[in-house]
Image: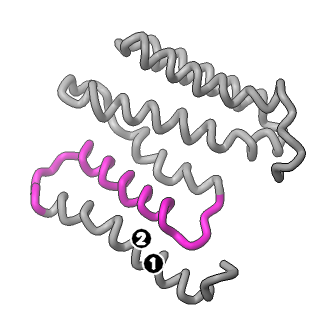
Amino acid sequence: RDRVDAAVLVKAAAGLTALAAFPVPVSRWLRRKKDPQGFFLALHLSALAFFLFSFHVHEKAILVPVAPLLLIRDDDPARRSGVILYRDLFVVAATVSMSPLLFFEDLALPYFATLVLFLSLTLATTYPRAVGLGLVALGGLSALPLVVAPPPRFPD
């Protein structure tokens, strides 16, 4: 921000956001298939482009790309391996990325309760052991600030 004018950054962010989101509606238009699951995935990808390339985004904005993912059903065996695994990993990663904000708001107990519930429900499905361990490790990583104090040279 100190090297480039804010107006230039706003225009660059708008251009990058549009460029990142552009393939999603084009892909949906070219398919011309009425697939609600694909529509939810397209909503997710558009929201993710906005989250990644916008000029000013709050940490809570990660919930916008998460919401369409939660609408994707997992009863289609063809989608089970890829999209559903991505959905579950993305939801856990987004939740873990919000953990400092939730700790600041004294929401550690509800955070861990819902994280454990989500992990137990997703791990009850047919995921390989390595994926399950990865999800648990990612969830456990968010508990680290409760046990170990962060170095004082880093900001809150």
Q: Which residue is mark 1?
A: 14
Quarter of the picture holding the N terminus: bottom right
Please tell me in which quadrant of the rendered image residue 137 appears: top right
Element under disc 2: helix
- Residue under the image location 49 percent in, 60 percent down: 52
Please give left or right for residue 44 compared with residue 59 in the image: left
- Residue under the image location 75 percent in, 27 percent down: 144
- Residue under the image location 32 percent in, 48 percent down: 40
Residue 51 image position (x, y, % from top left): 50, 60
Please tell me in which quadrant of the rendered image residue 143 appears: top right
Asked if the magenta segment contains residue 40, the reply would be yes
Residue 156 image position (x, y, % from top left): 83, 50
Asked if the magenta segment contains residue 154, the reply would be no
| Cα–Cα gap, marks 1 and 2 | 5 Å
Element under disc 1: helix
The amino acid marked with disc number 1 is Ala
Label at residue 17: 2
The amino acid marked with disc number 2 is Thr
How many other residues sit within 10 Å of disc 1, few (<14), some (14-19) or many (≥20)?
some
